[in-house]
Image (cartoon, grey):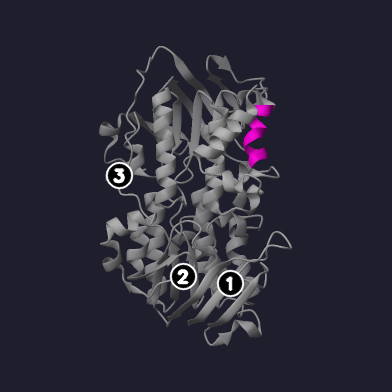
Amino acid sequence: MISAQDITFSYASRQADERPKAVLTDCSLNLGPSQALAVMGPTGAGKSTLSYVLAGLAPRHTGGTLLGSVAIAGHDLRDGPPAIGSVGVLFQDAATQLFNTTVEDEVAWGLEAMGLAPHEIGQRVEVSLAHFELTAVRQRAPWALSGGQQKRLALAALWTMRPGVLILDEPLGGLDPEGCAEVLAAVDTLREAGTTLLIMTLQPEMARQAGALALLADGHLSSAMPVTAWLEQEVALAESGLLLPTRLWPDLSPRVAVDHRDPAIEVQGLRFRYPGGTEVLHGIDLTIPRGQFVALVGRNGAGKSTLVRHLNGLLRPSSGAVSVMGRPLAGRAAGTVAGHVGFLFQRPEQQLFSATVRDEIAYGPARLGLSDVAARVDNVLARFGLENVADVPPALLGYGAQRTVTLAVLAALATPIVVLDEPTVGLDGRGLGQLLAWVAELREQGVTIVLVTHDLGLAARADRVITLDNGAITSDDTPAEAHGGSA
């Protein structure tokens, strides 16, 4: 079903006098019907590029140069793209492949492109919506869904087409435990139906589902081996930067005593509904003292991202009030709040817009009128190892590098409050280590941290764990009290 021989691929150079660097070098793999293979590799190893090549998207739609041969179900991709519905691809950022106006239309679109009869389209759509628990949001716009719901929607749209080959790029990223279980169950269903699966992942549990594993490093793909043989090599995987065992995590315990009489954030009676939609938040009351590390957990669609976007003025309450550092946000422009609240978006490209990495980091401090902008920029470029890409457009960087840039942007602002929305999604061991080291520094400085996460291990390192469900706070405990709860 997938036959790739001696693939070497390079994207076009950014500059005319620059020689293209190969992203993939002499990669080969062969998968038959019902076979599954997981490909693990650190950020920037070329996993997404390999997905694009095997799906016939690269170089046809990306540009670049491809050497070697690729065939899907016996069709040589050099002769033309694969047949509609023969191969499906889940992008690492699922939102980029959603374009219809409703969830229902998104699931139906591929079936319509395949020319199926209307009654069969209707039946398949109903089954797919139910299977991925999307029936209740079938009339919502895909861009109004949470990140996890978008991932489930993209999977539903692919699953319903019953492709012979399915390529999944980080399928568990951003999903709650229930969503992960749904994806793992869907993978089982697809394999039983004869689908060939190629899974690009950083998640050991996803690799175990495949049974066989190959490592991609520096553009070279290893031979496949039983997944248990690879994952037993914890030390080697850690040294390669692929994984970061919890025993190697830095100490995230508080360094500065928290004064509960001195609130950094106060939320009173917060209710919110998106225009034309139902109410998402239902009377949230919340006080976070200065210096506290709070983990906000809950299933996809619970309202976590909606809540934290009120903390820096990106969203305004339908009713209720939000105060930051003793000042109400009502009537204040979001830009004026940026000096108090640093915000890391769930998708890093949502907050990157400048011509170079250096300009990106300098933008916030300059807008706030800080006097030491150049020094701040130089310091964080060095702190996060970004000197070699300082003059590169952030949009051209890979996901992991973009995430590093967003951390540097926040570090340059040095705000007393930092809000992190799903910061670990898509990070390899090195990226996770970099994030945790920075969080440890924030703890030493007494910075107030609000973390949205599905990572129960990381949530357990916080001072306080707040669970949100259906737009309301259902529990507010210390990590020890919250142990065993659902995230």
Disc 1 target residue = 9
Tell me if mark 1 has few (under 14), some (14-19) or many (20+) residues whose alpha carbon lies within 10 angstroms of its own. many
Q: Which residue does the image show at 68% across and 62% down from the upper left?
A: 18
Nearer-N-terminus badge (3/1): 1
Specify the amino acid type for callout 2: His
Q: Which residues are magenta?
A: 358-366
Cα–Cα gap, marks 2 and 1: 11 Å
- Secondary element under disc 2, as helix, strand or loop, is strand
Q: Which residue does the image show at 45% across and 53% down from the upper left?
A: 173
- Secondary element under disc 3, as helix, strand or loop, is helix
| Number of numbered discs on residues | 3
Specify the amino acid type for callout 1: Phe
Cα–Cα gap, marks 2 and 3: 27 Å
Q: Are marks 2 and 1 in contact (CB under 8 Å)?
A: no
Q: Position of residue 434 (x, y in %)?
A: 43, 42
Nearer-N-terminus badge (2/1): 1
- The C terminus appears in which quarter of the rendering? top left
Residue 193 quadrant: bottom left
